[in-house]
Amino acid sequence: MSLREGPSPIIDITASGVMIRRYLDLRGVEIKELAERMNVKPSTIYKWLEGRRIPSIDNLVALSYYLETPMDSLIVSSVPPMKPIKFEDSTHTGTSNSSQSLFILFNSYGSSA
């Protein structure tokens, strides 16, 4: 398999801050309360909201948990849509279901279940 062509994706930290703010408001969560739960300073959260910093992966996991939303809904990036990768299914031969499509979501950074 070869690597994808094109420029590297870039996280839009300003738009990500807007999304974090949207979920804070939607859930009715106060910044001070969230900071206490996450064991960070309120100023750290303000930096995320203002687009001056991006949360670490650990903090993204915590944000996702406390705001009850998938991590990929908190991060906005410049990644274009991905094309499906075809894999042969050796259990079905001679049928129209002989292959499966797998979509790789590069920009999701995982999600919470």
Image (spheres, rainbow, N blue to C red):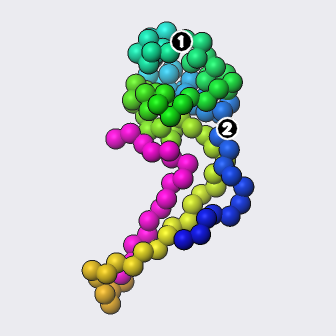
Q: Residue furthest right?
A: 7
Residue 16 locus on image (x, y percent): 61, 33
Helix or strand or loop: what does disc 1 sit on? loop
Does the stretch in magenta take in 100?
yes
What mark, if any, has residue 41 been given in the picture?
Answer: 1
- Tell me what residue is drawn at x 45 percent, y 45 percent: 110
Depth check, mark 1 against mark 2: the one in front is 1
Q: Residue furthest front?
A: 2
Residue 30 locus on image (x, y percent): 48, 12
96 or 31: nearer the viewer: 31
User: Circle 2 is placed at which residue position?
Assistant: 12
Q: Is residue 30 above or below residue 101?
A: above
Image check: 24 left or right of 47? left
- Tell me what residue is drawn at x 51 percent, y 67 percent: 84
Asked whether residue 36 appears in the rendered view, the answer is yes
Q: How many marks?
A: 2
Quadrant of the image occupied by residue 88: bottom left
In the picture, the quarter occupied by the N terminus is bottom right
68 or 112: nearer the viewer: 112
Circles 1 and 2 in contact, beta carbons < 8 Å: no
Image check: 87 left or right of 75? left
In the picture, the quarter occupied by the C terminus is top left
11 or 73: nearer the viewer: 11
Magenta range: 97-113
Q: Dot 2 surroundings within 10 Å: few (below 14), some, or many (20 or more)? A: some
18 or 35: nearer the viewer: 35
